[in-house]
Amino acid sequence: MILFKAKFYILYLFSYDSNHIAMIPLQILEDYNCIAKIYPKGGTVFNEGEAPKFYYQIKEGDVKMFNLTEEGKEFVQGYFNKGKSFGEPPLFGEYKYPASALCLSECTILKLPKVNFFKLLKAHPQIHLNFTQILCKRMVYKAKIMKEVSIFPPEHRILTLLNHLKENTDSDKDYEVRLTRQQISELTGLRVETVIRAIKKLEKSNKLYIKERKVYL
C-alpha cells in the first residue's frame, strides 16, 4: 500500500490560499478564445486516463484531483481554488491524465484548447516562465512527499506538508492552515484519527498551535 501511495502521490502542487492570484490574466485567456463552463457540485472535469485537450483555470469554485484504488480507496493529489490552474503537466508531457478532477462546489472553469494554450505561452514568455517555475516546485514537492510516505512517522509527515504550504506564501505572519483534518488525512495517506493525534502531539512540542480549532504555524 505504501508503494502505491508513493507512486501516485501528489503529482500536482497543493494549491489553496487566500490571495486568489490568477495563473493567467482573464483578458489574455479571452484573447485566445477561452470558454467559461459551469460545472455542478460533484461534476467531473476530466477522468483519469483521458487525453488532455484543454488548459483549465478556475474562475469560481473549488476542485480536487484524486486517484481511486481497485478497492475504491481515494487518494487526493491536490485541492485547487479560484485563480488556480490544474491538470497542465499532461499538456506539456503528452500523456494521459494520471488522476481525475472533481468539483467540490459549483464551479466556473475557463477552458482553453491545447493548441491555443501553447500559442499563448509562445507569445507571453513571462507566463511561460511562471509555468516552468511552478512545475519545478511541483517536482520538488512530489520528491519530498514520496520520502515522507516511505520513511517518516505521522507527525513529521504532517509538519512537512504544512511547512511546505507556509513556505509558498508571501506573508511573514503566523500561517493559518486552511485545511480540515480530513483534507490533511487525504493528502498524507493517514487516517483522520491519526492526524488528530499527531496534531495534538505537534502542539505539545510547540511545533504549531491551535486557536479556535484552527491550526497555525
Image (cartoon, rainbow, N blue to C red):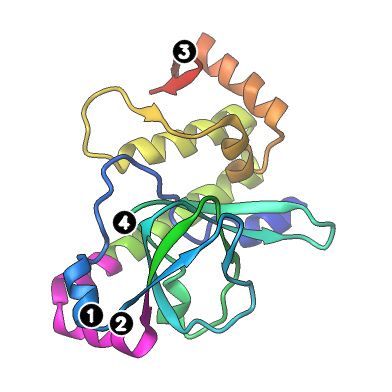
x then y, percent, for residue 76:
60, 52
Q: Which mark is residue 121?
A: 1
- Can residue 202 be seen? yes
Question: Which residue: 26% across, 58% down?
Answer: 22
Element carrying mark 4: loop
Q: Along the polypeptide, which appears first: circle 1 or circle 3?
A: 1
Q: SS of the residue at dot 1?
A: helix
What amino acid is labelled 2 in the image?
Phe
Res 117 label: 2
Q: CA distance from mark 1 to mark 4?
A: 17 Å
Secondary structure beneath dot 3 equals loop
Is 68 displayed left or right of 201 in the figure? right
Residue bearing mark 3? 212
Region of the chain picked out in magenta, as a range: 111-132
Q: CA distance from mark 2 to mark 1?
A: 6 Å
Which amino acid type corresponds to the residue marked 1 in the rendered image? Leu
* Label at residue 175: none
**Type of amino acid at the residue the image marks with label 4:** Gly
Dot 2 falls on a residue whose secondary structure is helix
* Badge 3 amino acid: Glu
